[in-house]
Amino acid sequence: MRRFSDRHQVSWFTYDRLTILSIVIFLCSALIFFRLFKLQIIDHDRYLARAEDQHVVEKELDPNRGSIYIHDYQAGNGAVYPVAINKKFYEVFAVPDLIKNPVQTAKLLAPLLELGEEQEKSLAARLSKEEDVYEPIKHKIDEAKKLAIEALELAGIKFNEEIFRYYPEGENIAQVTGFVGFKGDDLVGQYGLEGYWQKQLAGEKGFFTFERDAQGRLIPLARRVKAEQENGADLVLTLDRSIQFTACNSLKLAVEKHGAEDGSVIIIDPKTGAILAMCGYPSFDPNNYGEAEDYKVFNNYNISEPYEPGSMFKGLTMAAALDVGAVTPATTYEDTGSVEIGGYTIKNSDGQAHGIKNMTQVLEESLNTGAIFAAQQVGIELFRDYFKRFGFGENTGIQVDNEKPGTIASIKGKSVISMYTASYGQGITATPLQIVSAFASIANGGKLMKPYVVDEVKHANGKIEKTEPQMIRQVISSKTATTLSAMLASVVKYGHAQRAQIPGYYIAGKTGTAQVADPNGGYSADKTIHSFVGFAPIEDPRFVMLVKLNHPKGVRFAESSVVPVFGEIAQFLLNYLHVPPSYDISQTP
């Protein structure tokens, strides 16, 4: 009986072990199955990507950035000159492990790399580092300097090729081009044309995908995928190299002579709106933009700094009054020296009363009271409409980064005093580009053209986009434009702009000596902005030019500061453009 019981217990024990083992095997199988299911189905894409990362390589293909050119008409045959290109430079670096005499090596490198005494000592210390296989020394070394360093045959001194943006004209055109600089880890266009046209200049990146073996070698017969990069477009500007150089040089001399804070010059073709020159001083070297002490110089003064233009606007006020038939050049008023309105007294700039004056004399003598009289004849609604038609209060669309619209908000309501002050260029703001464009419409028979600085866009695929001149609107009648041109010519011959005269030519223009608004209210007692805008010759204008100086010292009015600069540049332009004289200088015009 006991023997049977023992056998029964052994049988059940064996059965239990088999059951447990079966369960364990089942669970293990289930676990393995689930693991395989997860690996092959659920996580398939992730592990496939990890596997491909080990043997599939994707390399970006960088496009060439497009270049920027200006016209060089003096060279003939449609020649252009580069002002922004890609240039090969070198990084010089050291492998300290290979350098036996760090002090001597640093001493020999210092003069070639323009290093001071302390920099030389620092370099020697870095060249002495143990187990250092890479020590950067300097970037943007040109070919000549690389060859000079190589001639020293210094052990452990090596080079890497680099491509950087290069600007052959330096600061001469920097505020137009802008520069290419770092934003985070990326090199992108900033300011000027480089900023505005970043996408077109940069092009599109491509890529090249290939497979490699365990040793990292390219597998010749493996799958490859390649998407070609698209190189950036080239820009050809309307600027002329000789005109740009002459204008910028004259401006620089004027700023330095009069101790001005800064200055600008802009020259436009009135018939097309094409910009022939656009200068600002002080400027900066776009090849070394990081050395600029004040980032303000990155802005293009001609489009980015609206200001109260002063008496130049008397010409535009007169344009409105003539166009609506409210006055003629012979219309007279009595100048008592001041105008009273709303508890305010507005005086002439000289504080004097001039008696009976006609509208031409208002411009010649730049009388505030006369501009107010002309505006009164127009009325505030028409006055405001004309200023809008001239393009003030909105961007011109010049296609250069950071353009500002200025403001004519003060004359949007029914404030008569705001119309009075605006009539002689106070209480409203405008950029030099807006002002020169408005006067270009007078020179162009009343037609306002859209200003532009990009003549052609040349795409990498061979397509060329040519900018066609675009008329925005007829602002004033051709008759009004002709009449006003003659009045402005009288300003140059008999008025406050006589230093703009050029023998043999009829020149039209208007000065502006503007007060500077004080942040605490009112206007500064010792700061002014001098401007002059003019065109020549009046019978067939070839250019319109504005010259501006901010806060010149030792000179009171624009006729003694910017007008002579205009005359100097205008003389060059008339000769350079082969413009025949308006009259025989041996005769009295």
Image (cartoon, rainbow, N blue to C red):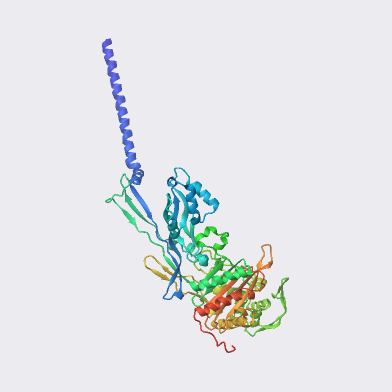
Asked if residue 184 can be seen in this view, the reply is: no
Quarter holding residue 162: bottom left
Q: Examine the rendered structure and indicate whether residue 453 appears above or below residue 353.
A: above
Question: At which x and y percent is residue 384?
Answer: 60, 73
Question: At which x and y percent is residue 549?
Answer: 61, 70
User: Which quadrant of the rendered structure holds the N terminus?
Assistant: top left
Most foreground residue, 344 or 525: 525
Q: Is residue 213 left or right of residue 169?
A: left
Most foreground residue, 233 or 253: 253
User: Which quadrant of the rendered structure holds the C terminus?
Assistant: bottom right
Question: At which x and y percent is residue 136?
Answer: 46, 50
Please state the total of marks drawn on the protein image: 0
Q: Examine the rendered structure and indicate whether residue 209 appears above or below residue 282.
A: above
Asked if residue 91 can be seen in this view, the reply is: yes
Residue at image position (48%, 49%) is 104
Residue at image position (43%, 76%) is 76
Q: Is residue 203 left or right of residue 431?
A: left
Residue at image position (34%, 57%) is 227
Residue at the extreme bottom of the image, as rendered: 587
Residue at the extreme top of the image, as rendered: 1
Q: Is residue 421 left or right of residue 217?
A: right
Question: At which x and y percent is residue 192?
Answer: 50, 64
Quarter holding residue 207: bottom left
